[in-house]
Amino acid sequence: MKRIVLIGYMGSGKTTVGKALAKEIGLPFYDLDWYIESRMRKKVSQIFAERGEEGFRQIERNMLHEVAEFEDVVVSCGGGTPCFFDNMDYLNQQAQVVYLRCEPEVLRQHLLMGKGDRPLLKGKTPEELIGYISEQVAYREQFYTKARYMLDVSLMDNYEKIKITIEKLKELLDL
Ligand code: S3P
């Protein structure tokens, strides 16, 4: 049984890599945010607006416990998922967890390009963004680095490099 979970900060490419890896090894792919949105029939941003971050984290935890029970899947988490409750320890018990590490400046570029609807970044200027990301990554690394596997994806800036990342992941996870 294979259960692979990708974690990392917003903009690190968890969904892109997760989808590509799942396709390559022939497993279904779940993105935790999409799963939450379809189960709740609401956008993540709407849940944040209605219930605040605390309410979202509770829902996220409950949904994580559903998704991380599925067998033979690739799952990508939200950037904050490992950093609340005992989620990181739970994930390590359940899955082969990979931290996709990425430099804050690269994250900032991805997040500026991406049209993503991200409540935590709403209203931040491009100048404010780098300080915010650097601080959050520095804080969150204590959780992210508990993952059994880590892969640096800072240079994954084109299709060829995504393919190389998938090959590296297959080697790392013995797939
Ligand atoms: C969050 C990341 C988002 C989403 C929510 C909160 C975070 O997911 O879960 O907006 O706390 O880092 P992505 O990492 O997929 O953008």
Image (tube, rainbow, N blue to C red):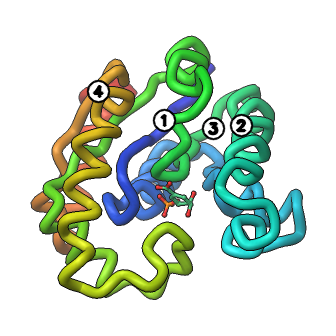
Residue 28 coordinates in the image, percent (x, y):
65, 48
- Point out the image quarter for the C terminus: top left
- Could you say whether the residue bearing mark 3 is in a helix, strand or loop? strand
- Precedes in sequence: disc 4 or disc 1: 1
- Of marks 4 and 1, the one in the foreground: 1
**Distance (Cα) linking label 1 and label 3:** 22 Å
- Precedes in sequence: disc 2 or disc 1: 2
- Of marks 4 and 3, the one in the foreground: 4
The residue to which callout 3 is attached is 73
Residue at 76 percent across and 51 percent down: it is 55
- Precedes in sequence: disc 4 or disc 2: 2
**Distance (Cα) linking label 4 and label 1:** 11 Å
- Precedes in sequence: disc 4 or disc 3: 3
Residue at 19 percent across and 69 percent down: it is 130
- Of marks 2 and 3, the one in the foreground: 2
Corner quadrant of residue 60 = top right
Residue 133 coordinates in the image, percent (x, y):
27, 61
Local crowd at mark 2 within 10 Å, few (<14), some, or many (≥20)? some
- Could you say whether the residue bearing mark 4 is in a helix, strand or loop? loop
- Could you say whether the residue bearing mark 2 is in a helix, strand or loop? helix
The residue to which callout 4 is attached is 145
Residue at 28 percent across and 35 percent down: it is 141
Q: Height in image: 108 above or below 171?
A: below
Residue 107 coordinates in the image, percent (x, y):
24, 66
- Could you say whether the residue bearing mark 1 is in a helix, strand or loop? helix
- Precedes in sequence: disc 2 or disc 3: 2
The residue to which callout 1 is attached is 83
Q: Residue 61's mark?
A: 2
Q: Which sits in the foreground, 107 or 152?
A: 107
Residue at 22 percent across and 42 percent down: it is 138
